[in-house]
Amino acid sequence: MSQLRIAEVFGPTIQGEGALIGEPTVFVRTGGCDYRCAWCDSMHAVDPAFRHDWASMSTDAVWQEVQRLSDNTPLTVSLSGGNPAIQDFAPLIQLGHAAGYRFACEAQGSIAKPWFGQLDCLVLSPKPPSSGETVDWAAFDRCVAAGETAAQTVMKIVIFDDADYNWARDAATRYPQLPLYLQPGNDEVDPSVAVDPQALADKLLWLVDKTMADRWFTPRLLPQLHVLLWGNKRGV
Ligand SMILES: C[S@@+](CC[C@H](N)C(=O)[O-])C[C@H]1O[C@@H](n2cnc3c(N)ncnc32)[C@H](O)[C@@H]1O
Ligand SMILES: Nc1nc2[nH]cc(C(=O)O)c2c(=O)[nH]1
Ligand code: SF4
Ligand SMILES: [Mg+2]
């Protein structure tokens, strides 16, 4: 079986974002990303400076760790990163499904993988202008197509400012078939600095006010629940 490059496996905790918010989840965070978002909250899984902290693990070793953390009790496993789409998770998904586990994946939509079609939930998160990245929509289309046989595919967009909001409106028009989730950006991502809960709430209020004023009733607006509970602490 193929080796996987893993930054961390942690949980069980609750999914803090998007469609599966609140759901008990074990996270498998891969190392390595083809993007460098200006505000990435997981640089320890992106920047090769942290590669010495990443482990080369067999699919079996990752599966053993998921089972250990969950006490062999089936739950949802979220594949995140970095970009998990760089790697081959088909064998892990197959092992987990056979034991009753469910699989979600968070990816930016730059690389499509056939195993997207085996997922219980594919979360595609195209990056708005504030990230400094430019979306390749042809690649994003390939991701949506690869996820066609997934139980569900949703789009989640992080919003920092007006330009991001306007960009999200265009992205939503492109993919009317995908349920849409908006989450305000967290501009304090240093794990050694405490987050300001009022600042996070103000960001969400700004987004709610704007969306309601525009009578844009398509997206669901959610905070990053885990950031409200634990700040930028890792492994939760
Ligand atoms: C760390 S990324 C890993 C998965 C994948 N690379 C992606 O970006 O979708 C997981 C989620 O966190 C979001 N995210 C990253 N930094 C954030 C920040 N500072 N504030 C809010 N959301 C953030 C991303 O947009 C993505 O939806
Ligand atoms: N609790 C919790 N929820 C999350 N939702 C998305 C996360 C991620 O970094 O991919 C994440 C995370 O790291 N922790
Ligand atoms: S795509 Fe995701 S993991 Fe990669 S830099 Fe952007 S937010 Fe971070
Ligand atoms: Mg995160």
Image: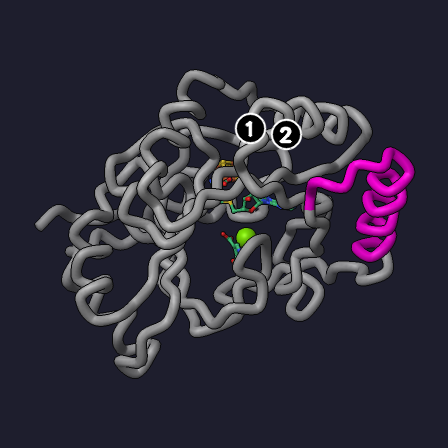
Residue pictured at 55% horizontal, 19% vertical: 134
Using the rendered view, name the quadrant where residue 69 is placed.
Answer: bottom left
Q: Residue at x 71, y 27 (%)?
A: 169
By secondary structure, the bulk of the magenta-drawn segment is best described as helix
The secondary element bearing badge 1 is classed as loop
Q: Is residue 183 left or right of residue 87?
A: right
Q: Looking at the image, which is closer to me, 124 or 215?
A: 215
Query: Which residue lies under the disc numbered 1?
Result: 175
Query: In the picture provided, is 36 more to the left or to the right than 27?
Result: right
Percent position of residue 210, x then y: 87, 38
Along the line of sight, which residue is nearer the eye, 43 or 121? 121
* Residue nearest the observer in this picture, 41 or 98: 98
Residue 20 falls within the magenta-colored stretch: no
State how the image is colored: one colour
Residue name at image x 53 percent, y 60 percent: 20
Indicate the secondary structure of the residue bearing disc 2: helix
Above or below — where is 117 with respect to 22? above
Span shown in magenta: 199-219
Callout 2 crowding tier (Cα within 10 Å): few <14, some 14–19, many ≥20: some
Please identify the residue farthest to the left as the structure is shown.
Answer: 1
Q: Which mark is residue 172?
A: 2
Is residue 104 placed above or below 209 in the rendered structure?
A: below
Callout 2 amino acid: Ala
Q: Point out residue 67 in the picture as x, y percentages from the top left corner.
A: 26, 74
